[in-house]
Image (cartoon, grey):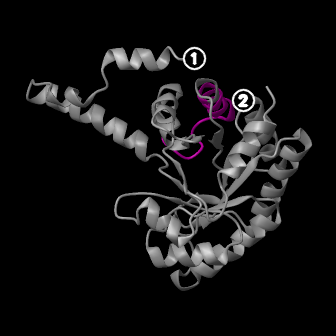
Amino acid sequence: MSLSGPAEQFRKLHARGGDVLVLPNAWDAASARVIAEAGARAIATTSSGASWSLGRSDGEALSRDEMLAVVRRVARAVSVPVTADVERGYGDGSPRAVAETVRAVLDAGAVGINLEDGEGPGAVTGLAAQTARVAAARDAADVAGVPLFLNARVDLFLFAVGDPATRFDETVRRARAYVGAGADGIFVPGVGDADTIGRLAAAIDAPLNVIARPGMPSIPELRALGVARASLGGGVARAALGAAWRVATEVLGAGTYDALAAGVPIANMNALFAQR
């Protein structure tokens, strides 16, 4: 199947001034199907959720092949466009490695990626090096003939990098450089207040993606601030694992099963997965 149609469809979901593209991130085929059934217009994978599901921590603890297996299963499970969290691009971090990852992601059925510049608390990849990686991702997609939506992630706020007084300006500087290198959207996790979000949306000439979490502006409020896309990251996976924790601690502690009452009936689950 050609990816051009789904890729164009996914791209249109980021139209500025339209509805916010809300992405409750999936980590396997089951979560993807449930999220799609709930009405999601696209599915985004979460590296943290995928890593936890395989017994690993987040942060490129999965190999490229392990990540691709997750993306492939998710893409096969749903009929809406899929975008993949490819962390820092895998491999040795070179532009060539990033290009290889993009080609493999397209082969797995995804039509978008998130590519991050964070290297952990207090550290990000140098601007020139990261810009080269963004450009390599864009070139690989162009050569493949697929209008991949390249969401470039700027991690200065998330990892508290640099002087707080200059963090906003440096985030905008990086965002503009990534857009110039071929990024279609900019993802800035770690910001939660309305003022900063609104200023970022106004300063960056590309669709802005934020991570939605408790205490942040609602989706309608984010739309008013100029946000184009709101992801939940690993939040849905953490909520699901939290439900498993509550069930397990209740039955192993009190010996009761009340927490199971919130589960989806077996017949409903079987009907959902019989659809494809």
Q: Is residue 90 visible?
A: no
Residue at 34 percent of width and 64 percent of height: 215
**Closest to the observer, 248 or 220:** 220
Q: Is residue 145 magenta?
A: no
Name, please, the residue furthest toward the bottom: 165
| Three-letter amino acid code of the residue under disc 2 | Ala
Q: Main secondary structure of the magenta part?
A: helix
Residue lying at the far front in this picture: please name it: 18
Which numbered mark, 2 or 1, is in the foreground of this view?
A: 1
Q: Could you tell me if the residues under marks 2 and 1 are in contact, i.e. CB atoms within 8 Å?
A: no
- Residue at point 86%, 45% (across, down): 140
Q: What's under tag 1, amino acid-wise?
A: Arg
Residue that label 1 marks:
276
Rendered-image quadrant of the N terminus? top right
Image-based side of 35 in relation to 177, left or right: left
Question: Label 2: which residue?
Answer: 108
| Label 2: which secondary element | helix
Q: Is residue 239 above or below residue 171?
A: above
**Mark 2 to mark 1 CA distance (whole Å):** 18 Å
Q: Position of residue 55 (x, y in %)?
A: 46, 31
Image quadrant containing the C terminus: top right
Q: Is residue 173 above or below residue 134?
A: below
Q: 127 or 176: which is nearer to us?
A: 176
Name above or below for residue 113 compared with residue 268: below
Which circle's residue, 2 or 1, is located before the other in the chain?
Answer: 2
Q: Quadrant of residue 10?
A: top right
> Start and end of the magenta stretch?
57-74
Coordinates of residue 190 in the picture (x, y in percent): 49, 64
Local crowd at mark 2 within 10 Å, few (<14), some, or many (≥20)?
A: many
